[in-house]
Amino acid sequence: MHSAESDPVTFHGVSPNNGDDNKRTKGKATAPSFQNTFGEIVCEIGRSRDDTVCITAAMKEGTGLVPYSTEFPNRFFDVGIAEGHAVTFAAGMAMQGMRPIVAIYSTFLQRAYDHIIHDVALQNLPVIFCLDRAGLVGEDGATHHGALDIAYSRCIPNLVVSAPKDGNELRNLIYSALNQVKSPFMIRYPKSSSFKFDKNGQADLIPIGNWKKVATGKDVAILAVGSMVKPALEAANALVKDKISCEVINCRFIQPLDEKYLKYIFDRF
């Protein structure tokens, strides 16, 4: 109780603590989380582009925006638990020439669905939505599962929907959204390790709607989205012992689909 009262932000939601009220258990990660990676990337962008701002709805810590809020206090906006307002606020900024990046948990962006459609998508405004905790989130519980965003986003007009396989691709997608697109852009990623992130790396712009082959095979094709690319590659490697050759495709864009590549796959497998 004392810990929660003295530090309500940190102890708003806690993981198992092995019986010690002041310690929480964390697993070891080989790469920074997607959240920390996102925080690094937006700070990197903020230093070179003063037309960018970050907006969240009482999720500064969880989305990795603490460093950005410290370095760019006049370009960071936490609107509180008001996701709909965050989206409409971003739309207004985009109309005035700014490039807002909205970081919200996938499950809570559901509360702003109408605002996304009417205030951003139908106006075709260049707002970037970064959906944290996409997919299942384990200890955060059922209310925080981001299980619906693919279904509810693909039908929204003018919206590009994407998912990075790792931290480097997250950087590439954010830069691609900023430099290649003048319409709304959604990027979804889980609460997990980012698998690979080169802190001092350079962004590579990705053609919108373009998938990428990450393993070549001739017997089976595995189409993987986002963080599922890594287990898809592991499955392909495991099948080698059974003499099954797997092709793995990184389907980093969910909307639009890479129809040309899909036809190529259908013709081959």
Image (tube, rainbow, N blue to C red):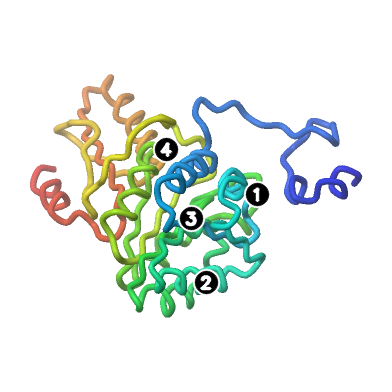
User: Of circles 1 and 4, which is in front?
Assistant: 4
Q: Quadrant of the C terminus?
A: top left
In the image, farthest residue toward the right = 2
Residue under label 3, please give it. Answer: 131
Tag of residue 47: none
Three-letter amino acid code at the position of disc 4: Gly
Residue under label 4, please give it. Answer: 167
User: Of circles 1 and 2, which is in front?
Assistant: 2
Most foreground residue, 259 or 162: 162
Q: Give the image quarter of residue 105.
A: bottom right
Q: CA distance from mark 1 to mark 2?
A: 28 Å
Mark 3 touches mark 1? (CB < 8 Å): no
Q: Residues within 10 Å of mark 2 (few under 14, many from 20)?
A: some
Q: CA distance from mark 3 to mark 1?
A: 16 Å
Among the two numbered marks 3 and 4 on one chain, the one whose residue lies closer to the N terminus: 3
User: In the image, is residue 11 above or below residue 232?
Assistant: below
Q: Secondary structure at mark 3?
A: strand
User: At x 58% / y 45%, what residue is drawn?
Assistant: 71
Q: CA distance from mark 4 to mark 2?
A: 28 Å
User: At x 34% / y 46%, what residue is drawn?
Assistant: 225
Three-letter amino acid code at the position of disc 3: Leu
User: At x 35% / y 38%, what residue is drawn?
Assistant: 229
Tag of residue 140: 1
